[in-house]
Image (tube, rainbow, N blue to C red):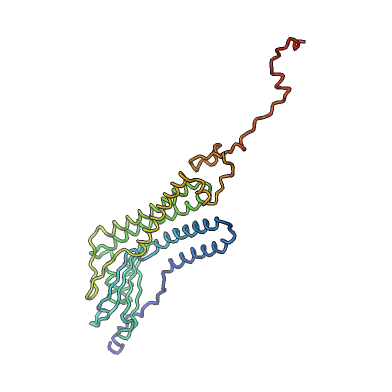
Amino acid sequence: MAAFGHTFPFYTGHKPTFPMDTSLAVIIAIFLTSLVTFIILLPGIRGKMRLFWMLRVVTSLFIGAVILAVNFSSEWSVGQVSTNMSYKAFSSEWISANVGLQIGLGGVNITLTGNPVQQLNETINYNEEFTWHLGKNYAEEYAQALEKGLPDPVLYLAEKFTRNSPCGLHGQYRLAGHYTSATLWVAFLCWLLANVMFSMPVLIYGGHMLLATGIFQLLGLLFFFMATSLTPPCPLHLGTAMLHTHHGPAFWITLTTGLLCVLLGLAMVVAHRMQPHRLKAFFSQSVGEDPVLERNPEEGGLLSPRYRSTAESPEPQDIPLSEASSEVPCEDPDCAL
């Protein structure tokens, strides 16, 4: 074996990696294309409406992009450690490397990067993904990793998330990911309904849908937190160090976006009660120029007769003078003639 430079022949080379998850890349590309298209059309909007449209579209696209992106993100729980550790099975050679662990709603991603990258006549740079969502078989993917002969640190972390591991991380994170992903999809549906309501004269219902969008995001965070934090953590020993995980960027950006949606929804409900004219002006909805226009406090009553102005009310019909005089009783004695 020494003739191969201390590299066992059944180990394959490291897999080339894309710098970003393809699902996230597609989502970001779609929303950026929508934003660029709107910016191109923005000069056609005049006056203050241009600023209002800009704020609404950018905020709405940001919320929708975040809900979709975090659903496919692998950075809900993350951890990283730099240590000296064994590199491959049946070998006493150790390496100095950085090990990263990213746990998402649908699986785990494990990275191994040498420090420096070139060690033992090899390029140590691995990025392996093991999934359990959409009918994926985690045990089968782990078995394939064993057959390929991946480095020991990668196999050690992947083994901790198998179904038969005493740590129980597989069921813990799989359950958390299932319910969190479901609530995020409901939040995305509420976001779509909110945008539909904002394009119609039912702004109060759009505010309610935006409020529901934030509530479902926070509910998904609650599921993930309860499923992953109420059990004792599993120790992950890597060489001379221990890997600890904590909530990642996807968790915190979901929390921020959920609170933003709740605040915007409450602000719309309050504005609808206190300043309905300004709310309609912000959404480019005209309420008419008649100062005596009656407005129902409920947005759904737009089609109610109370929204008619006095100018639109039926005008009294003129009664002909002949008919009016014929109905007046005659008091003069000569009328009898």
**Is residue 137 in view from this perspective?**
no
Relative to the observer, which residue lies in front, 164 or 209? 209
Q: In screen coordinates, is 199 left or right of 19?
A: right
Of residues 307 and 61, the one drawn nearer to the viewer in this rendering: 307
In the rendered image, residue 229, in percent from the top left (x then y), is placed at 27, 59
Q: Residue visible at 69% across and 28% down?
A: 318
Among the 4 quarters of the image, the one containing residue 63: bottom left
- Spot the residue most to the bottom: 3
Q: Position of residue 18 (x, y in %)?
A: 42, 74
Q: Position of residue 270 (x, y in %)?
A: 43, 46
Q: On the rendered image, what quadrant is the C terminus found in?
A: top right
Residue 71 occupies which quadrant of the picture?
bottom left
Specify whether 37 is left or right of 90.
right
Identity of the residue drawn at 69% across and 15% down: 329
Q: Is residue 281 above or below residue 124?
A: above
Quadrant for the N terminus in the image: bottom left
Single out the residue that lies furthest toward the right: 337
Q: Nearer the viewer, residue 58 or 99?
A: 58
Q: Residue at image x 53%, y 42%? A: 302
Q: Residue 163: image x %, image y %?
A: 28, 64
